[in-house]
Amino acid sequence: MAHNRIYLCLAHMSGEEQKFIKEAFDTNWVVPLGPNVNGFEDDLKQFVDENKEIVALSAGTAAVHLALLACGVGPGDEVIVQSFTFCASSHPVTYLGATPVFVDSESESWNMDPVLLEQAIEDRIAKTGKKPKAIVPVALYGMPYRIDEIMAIANKYEIPVVEDAAEGFGSRFDGHVLGTFGRYGVLSFNGNKMITTSGGGALICPDAEAKREIMFYATQARESYPYYQHEHIGYNYRMSNICAGIGRGQMTIVNEHIAHHKHVCALYKELFAGVDGITLHENPSPRYDSNYWLCTILLDPSLHVKGEENAYKVAIQGAVGGAAGVTHAASTLHTDCEPNTNVEAMRMALDAAGIESRPLWKPMHKQPVYANNPAYVNGVSESLFAKGLCLPSGPYVSDEDVHYIVEQIRANI
C-alpha cells in the first residue's frame, strides 16, 4: 500500500485561524500588540491557570531567556539545567553570560533526577561559594517531571524554578498544568508543537507585576520619555498580532489535539504488545498525565534490525528533522555518543518507507559546545539516547498510519 510521507508532528489548522487573521488585516493590527495578542494571552490564562499571568512571545527560547533574566541570572552565575533536552533549554543561560550546570535524568520520567539535583546544588555551593541562580527542569516529549520533589529541593535552597514545558503544553502532574509550579513556566508554539502560532511561545508569570517587567524587556526596554530612552538592555521578543490570531484559532481545538496524541500513544501500546525488544515510554504512575507530544520507544540493544551493517556508513548532509537546509554537513561518520546501530538502521528503514522518525535528544553534557561545563550524570540519558526513537504522533497521524508504522517496524526486525 502506498503512503504519503508521515511526519513526526505537523501543525493542524482548524479554520478558525482565518477569522482572527482577517480581523487583524481589516483593522490593520499587524504589529507585536493588539486584540489578538491580548485575547491569546487571556485564552492561555484560562487554559493554564486563572491565577497566573501570560506574556505571548516570539519563541519558547525567548521565554526561557526572559525568565532567567527575571530571576537575576547574569555573568558569572550558574544555572542548573536538565541535560536531556533540546538546546533551547540551555543556550539562553549562555546568552546572559552564565554557565549551564547539567543534571542527568531518572529512568521513569526521563527528566531531571531530584537526587542528582540536590547533589549538584550542594557541590556547586562547596566549589563556588554561592548557589545556582535558577533550576530548569524540562518536560521531555511532554512527560511531566517530578516537580513535587524538585520544588521541595528548590524551596529548601531558595532557588527559583523555571519550568521548561515547551513540549508539555497541556501535560499535568497531580492534576495541575505544567508551568504553574515554579516561578515561571515556558511554553512553545512552534510549527510542530501541540498548538502553533507558526512560530512563538509564551511565559507563564506569577503575577501582574512580573508580567509587566517581562513585557518591558520583551519590547526593547524603553523608558517613558517622548523619545527613545534606554537604561536597560531589552529584546524584540513580543508576538505579532497576526501570529497570535493563529494561536486563538488553535486554542479552539487544543483539547482535541491533546486527546489525539494520547489516542495515538494508546494505539502504539496496543500494536506493540507482544513485540519483544521494543518498549513504549508511558506515564510512570497516575500522578503523571503526559500530552504525549511525541511517542517514543526504546530498542533493546540485543534486538537485530535489518540493515544494521549499513548504519553510519554515509555522512549526513542535511538535517534529520528540524530546520532542514541550515545545518553544517557532518564532518565525521561517528561521534563519541550516538544511537546504537539498530536504532539508526530502524530510522533509515522507516525513512525509506516514507516515515519520519528521529533519535531522542542528545544529552547536553555530551554536546561539544558544552564539553567543559559542570555535569552531574548517572548514565541514564546517555543510555536512553543510545536506545531511543521518536515516532509520528501529530494531528495528521491517522490510525491507519500508526498501523502502517508498526507494520514497518515489525517487518524490519
Image (spheres, rainbow, N blue to C red):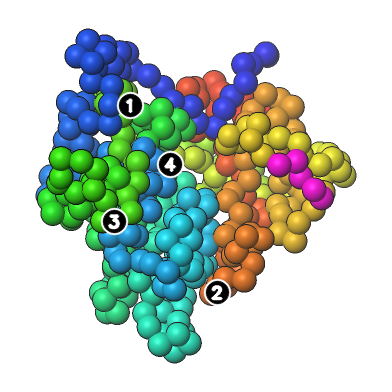
Residue plotted at (39% across, 40% down): 59
Could you say whether the residue bearing mark 2 is in a helix, strand or loop? loop
Quarter that holds the N terminus: top right
Counting residues from the N terminus, which is met first, the one under dot 2 or under dot 3?
A: 3
- Image check: 335 left or right of 96? right
Residue 91 percent coordinates (x, y): 49, 55
Write down the region rendered in magenta: 328-332
The amino acid sitting under disc 4 is Tyr
Give the amino acid type for the residue marked by disc 2 in the picture.
Pro
Q: Amino acid at mark 3?
A: His
Residue 367 versus residue 357: which sits nearer the camera? Answer: 367
Q: Residues within 10 Å of mark 4 (few under 14, many from 20)?
A: many
Mark before the other along the chain sequence, 4 or 2: 4
Q: Amino acid at mark 1?
A: Cys
Disc 1 and disc 2: Cα gap in Å?
A: 38 Å
Mark yes or no: residue 392 visible: yes
Q: Mark 4 highlights which residue? A: 292
Say above or below: 313 vs 164. Answer: above
Q: Which label is found at residue 232?
A: 3
Q: Nearer the viewer, residue 94 or 192?
A: 94
Reading the image, the residue beneath label 2 is: 374
Question: In the image, is residue 208 above or below residue 111?
Answer: above
Disc nearer the start of the sequence (4/1): 1
Q: Is residue 188 visible?
A: no
Depth check, mark 4 against mark 1: the one in front is 1
The residue lying at 30 percent from left, 13 percent from top is 18
- Distance CA(mark 1)–CA(mark 3): 27 Å
